[in-house]
Image: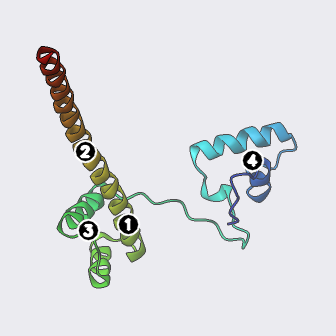
Amino acid sequence: MKRLASSDSLGAMISVCPFTEEKDSSHVYRRGFQSMLEGFNEEDCIEETGQISEKKRRLSVDQVKALERNFEVENKLEPERKVKLAQELGLQPRQVAVWFQNRRAQWKTTQLERGYGVLKSNYESLKLNFDTLQKRQRIYTCRGN
């Protein structure tokens, strides 16, 4: 299917992937936008080669749980492990690889957020100590005069 840049208009998308054959262009745009929000149906969007594009497949709850358990053991996949896991779960090896890649990105974000929280807490504690020391110094300086 032809990829469109973010600057391409909805009209260009409709010309590549028509949602209706009706002549009323406002209806075409409205129906096209509505279909984008609801997700494409297989028969709605035919690739330029004439083949029907595949729908995005969601993983089952059991598949996700199994992938999560494997991720906890090791967040990197060796090729043999990827193939074995894909066979066990009834997935394509590429699906398993992409899931692990996405999960590592999510894990990294979580780690960064935790690290930020620790740094922020340490900073606030140091600032409080600094402010307390400054107050004491002012009091000491005032008494010394």
In the image, residue 51 lies at what x, y percent?
67, 71
Mark 1 lies on residue = 101
Label 2: state its secondary structure.
helix
Circle 3 — which element?
A: loop
Q: Which mark's residue is nearer the viewer, 3 or 2? A: 2
Q: Is residue 75 left or right of residue 94?
A: left
Residue 93 or 112: which is nearer the viewer? 112
Spatial CA distance of label 1 from label 3 is 9 Å
What amino acid type is highlighted by mark number 3? Asn
Looking at the rendered structure, the kind of residue marked 4 is: Leu
The residue positioned farthest toward the bottom in the image shown? 80
Give the colour scheme of this rendering: rainbow
Of callouts 4 and 1, which one flags the residue occurring earlier in the amino acid sequence? 4
104 w.r.t. 19: above or below: below
Residue hosting label 2? 119
Q: Secondary structure at mark 4?
A: helix
Q: Mark 3 or mark 4, which is nearer the start of the sequence?
A: 4
Q: Residue at x 29, y 62 (%)?
A: 63
